[in-house]
Amino acid sequence: MFDRSIPMIGFHTIIKAHESVDALIRLIEEGLAPNGFNTIILEMRYAFRCFPEYSTGTITYEDAGRIADACEQHGIRLVPLLPCLSHQSAGPRSIPYPLFQAHPELLERQGVVPGTDWPDFVLHSWCASNDDVYQYIFPMIDEMAQACRAQAFHIGMDELFDVAVCPKCRSKAPAELYARTVKLLHDHLAAQGLDTMIWGDRLLDAQKMGYSMWEGDRFGVHPALHRRDEVTRDIIVCDWHYEWHSAGYPSVETLVKEGFFTIPSFWRDEKNAAHFWLHALEAQYLANRHGWAGKLGGMLCTNWRSLDDEAVGNMLASIRGEDADGPGADIGRVIRDMAPKGRKMFEYHSFKTE
């Protein structure tokens, strides 16, 4: 299981091609490990053994094993990520992943014209009432977890827009559909001895908290926060916000108060990351002051561009303090600026007394 007695200093990234593996290992060895990172959340475009016809990229089982080896050598936990429920399309957002091209009956919204994009369409999701999807998803999860020798698995669940719209779902509450999906996935992972991670945005009332419809929910999903028997408090929640919010980030306080091990998650703007972190520390102070059930569990730096040699080179240059530019340089600056703050969490009383 995932050790929560230490703060998580994490890095999330996407790799799509077999050729990117060496670049990621270089980043681990030269950038992440020397700066104290202890967790990588790895979103892979993966070549499945169990269902090769539904592969999304060329990262192999053996590639994942090489990455796991590098992580273990440096004391880093490797957490694979497979987007679940939402985010079932990529590239042109109306083109679903291969599984759903072959089985369109599993989609929540069918018949979307190829090329349809924002604001007419956002992202495909699977039908939360059609459990046939799990005959594919569970083996995919199991294979990725085994390949990565994982202690935890990240199931995504972010940016869910199409929910309760298909004939099977429209009579059901969006929160019910979301929470049931979380529970099915969580229980499958728990049976394998794995902890569950999710992105936290669908648990947030966007209008109440002042977030956009990307960072929070406006479709009736957020009441799932209070369905404790399904959205259980052993789930690790990554609370991402990539834009400046001058009034603060009330989601951190909300999630900690609700009992979650909560991970503030940043992207490419080092000033926004530092601002977000200051408000996250306020939430941890309040948690200690009032005895809330959850805690600030660490931090996560995210990278939403697929890694390659150029991006890693720019990241490493920025981490070293060089005047770098180009893809990855901004992520390197966030790593450089936030890593010392993450390491300082190891001094916090709330962790040292456990």
Image (tube, rainbow, N blue to C red):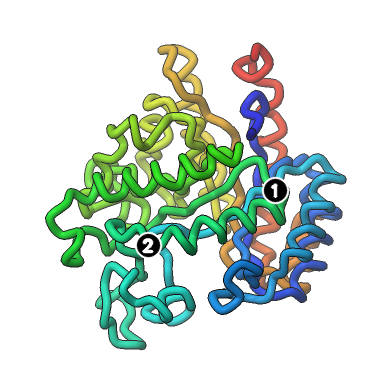
Callout 2 secondary element: helix
For the question of whether residue 228 can be seen, the reply is yes
Sort mark 2 into few (<14), some (14-19) or many (20+) by Cα contacts within 10 Å: few
Q: On screen, 219 above or below 102? A: above
Residue pictured at 41% horizontal, 75% vertical? 100
Q: On screen, 96 above or below 63? A: below
Label 1 amino acid? Leu
Question: Would residue 97 be found to the left or right of residue 207 on screen?
Answer: right
Sort mark 1 into few (<14), some (14-19) or many (20+) by Cα contacts within 10 Å: many
For the residue pair 323 and 190, the one nearer the viewer reads as 190
- Farthest bottom residue in view: 114
- Farthest left residue in view: 171
The x and y percentages for residue 229 are 34, 31
Residue pictured at 85% horizontal, 53% vertical? 29
Labels 1 and 2 touching (C-beta < 8 A): no
State the mark number for residue 132. Answer: 2
